[in-house]
Amino acid sequence: MIGMKCFRYIGYVFMLLVLPAITVVGQINPKDACRIEDGRLVFRLDLLWSSSQKREFVQLFDLDSTVMAGVYAGKTEIVSKGIVWKTKKLTIRIVELSKSLSSTPENSPLPGDVVMVDDEQAGYMIEAQRESSPYGVNKFTRYSVFQYIDGCARFYLPGHTDVNQVYISGTFNRWSTIQMPMQRSDSGWTIRLKLKPGKYLYKYILDGNWTSDPFNRLWGRDGYIEDNSVVYCYNYFFTLKGKTDAKAVYVTGSFNQWNRKELKMFKTRYGWALPLYLREGTHAYKFIVDGEYIPDPGNKVVRQDGSGNYNSIIGIGEPIFFTLKGYKNASKVIVSGNFNAWNQLELSMNRTPEGWRLPYVLAPGNYEYKFIVDGKWMTDPGNPFKTGHGEIENSILVVQPNYTFKLDQSTDAKSVIVSGSFNGWNKSGYKMAIVNHQWTFPVRLKPGKYTYKFVVDNKWILDPGNDLWEENEYGTGNSVLWIEP
Amino acid sequence: MLPGAKSAITLPLLFLIALLYLPTDLFAGKLHAADKFILVKPIVITAYYHPASSSPDGIESITIPLKRVGHLFLIEARIDDVVGNFVFDTGSSKLVLNKTYFRKYIAVDEENGGGMTGATDGVGRTSVRSLEVSGMKFSNLSADVTSLGHIENRRGVKILGLMGLSLLKQMEIVIDLNHNEIHLFRLDKKGNRMGAKGNRHFDLVQEVEEFQNILLVKAVIGGKSLDFCLDSGAESNVLSSYSSKSVMRTVTIIKRSDLVGVASGQADVLYGMMNDFSLGGRRFPTMKTIITSMDRMSKSYGRVIDGMLGYDFFCQGEICINLVRNEMGITFSKSTDK
């Protein structure tokens, strides 16, 4: 019996020693599975990984399904995409997968090279991807530090009169650190800038030192910098007459996803008001007076939202006019485009003596549209600018263009297309039209860099009117265009 | 060649002739292979051996507001009449201009070609009359002209060029990412800041070797001493994928991309963490790095270069590089000062 007991104890001790070792070997985290050893890239896989662990492993180390299938099938050598992988089984559940390191000369840095990381590692977001704010209200703690009247913004930084030079730098000048010096006064520094309504990020630079606006409680992130001051240049004033005995009035609308408690109006002598910035375009809204939703009694434009509610409607910006000459015998003409998700009922045009017309407010941009005349789709015969071909050809509407591509030569060509980074280098992209004896195409582009070429009767050419071009992978060059803010 | 450049050559040439009669050990540690290469280019001489023409008058220090785009450090400068962004790049030996905007600047002697690296693909040479950074003026500088479009396209920002090390001779460079500022101080012959009194205190001081117009520092990983190039233009640290076993044992690989489609088929792009990086006897917190071959770099310089210290390194604190004393002082950020 004593012998049996001894045996049992030895067994327990053995298990106590071995079990943790097995557990440790079994607990490979996919994150720690890769190493480099003797010029080889080595992975240690756990065959009992859950499917989410497996997915994590494959994503982290960019392994393809052939390799993974080979590992689970117990193969000792796997060939995939011309790469030879070796496997070695270490325990029942642990497999080592390896390949020789391949670093091509093209991929290794040369002296003077600027080593760059991928966008994910750099936490980088290009300007075009930034969401432009649909609305905004300022939060200054001292009202004299910012004024915006008739398109002119006045920034005032009190104090700091011992500093030699102060600059303002922001999204309005591409964060230039030397282009906008402020003027010194007895009490501080000021600058007046012509700015369009919108959202801007900015900072002051005091003798080279970046400083947020000390009297602004609104901050925004741009790249790595989180403490940029944010200012909105206003373009709209919500007002509600009367209701002066109400405790609280809010404005809510499509621009703020109908948030109920965000935009509180302030009481005036005659009622309630709220100045703010609203992005150009058409917006639906209502007031909430002590919890009760009401349409704006001062605004006659009201539209049904499709679920039986009536909302007040405002258009910010200049209206554009869709017009169609003729078709006087038609009974109904609709305009439909990507601005209203190609809705075939919403925007019915009005009959005029010459044909059909509809005023509509759209934010600056490039839009595609068509007319539906008694159920039949057609491009706008009065608009020479088109994209696509055949049945998927649409008219292009450019609201507030900020650049026009022009080509003086090849006016006898059959077709000229402008294709570039702004339309994904689409070869059936923007079809240019002859206006005033030259090929033209107006566009609205966000600030930033664009590369492009013209396609003249299927032949790609650089823009002969643009001195700026850069090398491309085909050795033929691309024209370069910068759109400033 | 721009007006004024010709007359500026005469004096330096006389100076050079005089130098031939001086004992050569006067240049020990100063004249390198790359300098010899530069010496055959007369325009360069004015910038390199004529401090009066490349230094600001009366300005002893400047603070340059730094902009960060991705992991690039950008500063704004005026070059002749053009204003724009330059990458502050201690890994570049000289001023480099973007061909897109300076194509017309390329001098006619392009056929002599070849950059510092011996690469002949599309590198032109030119000179610029003036470069001004935060009030500090440099004049008659030589520059390479090459395409930097790929940097612009990846980061969506206009880049006029790279501001390299040749502009920063006789200076102390302070890179302060906490405040997004770069300070430049002119130094006297002993390496003291002009007009400044007292010594600065650093958490760490490390010798810097100036080699062929790049800066090298010795760091220790896994008990091995390695040579790293100090490169503020690198968006990441870089560690040679062929480092020894004891080095690699301390590195964790956190991500791999299988870059298919490069000319020779396939390449591994590896991101890792350096868990045991020490400099000047002090262990650093874990730093990110790219792991790739350093072969081409090492071959170009004729010596082994084990890696590059880039963005992740400069994030550790205030990095102060004295180019007269050839030393680097680091004041760690509070968050990294462990």
Image: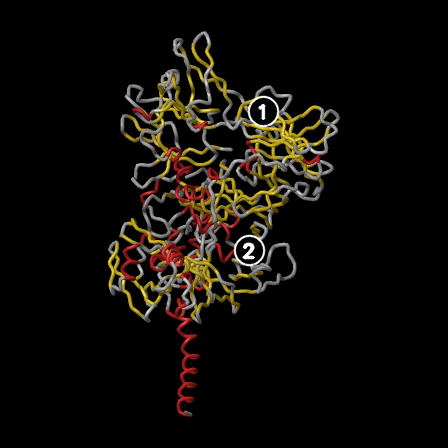
Report the side of A70 relative to A287 (left or right).
left
Q: Residue furthest front?
A: A1
- The residue at the point 40 percent across, 66 percent down is A28
Quadrant in which residue B105 is drawn: top left
**In the depicted structure, whether residue B312 falls above or below residue A162:** below
- Same chain under badges 2 and 1? The reply is no
Q: Amino acid at mark 2?
A: Glu
Q: Amino acid at mark 1?
A: Ser
The disc at residue B172 is 2
Q: In the rendering, at what x and y percent does residue B78 appear?
A: 51, 40
Observer able to see residue A192: no
Local crowd size for mark 2, using a 10 Å CA cut-off: few (<14), some (14–19), many (≥20): many
Query: Which circle, 2 or 1, is nearer the viewer?
Result: 1
**In the depicted structure, whether residue B315 falls above or below residue A358:** below
Please state which of residues B79 and A460 is positioned toward the viewer in this rendering: A460
Report the side of B8 relative to A37 (left or right).
right
Quadrant in which residue A182 is drawn: top right
Please state which of residues A108 and B146 is positioned toward the viewer in this rendering: A108
Local crowd size for mark 1, using a 10 Å CA cut-off: few (<14), some (14–19), many (≥20): many
Please state which of residues B194 and A301 is positioned toward the viewer in this rendering: A301
**Distance between mark 2 and mark 1 Cα atoms:** 63 Å
Observer able to see residue A301: yes
**In the depicted structure, whether residue B235 falls above or below residue A1:** above
Q: Chain of mark 1?
A: A
Q: In the rendering, at what x and y percent does residue A138 appear?
A: 64, 36
Q: In the rendering, at what x and y percent does residue A396 appear?
A: 40, 24
The disc at residue A312 is 1
- The residue at the point 54 percent across, 53 percent down is B175
Q: In the rendering, at what x and y percent does residue A469 appear?
A: 37, 35
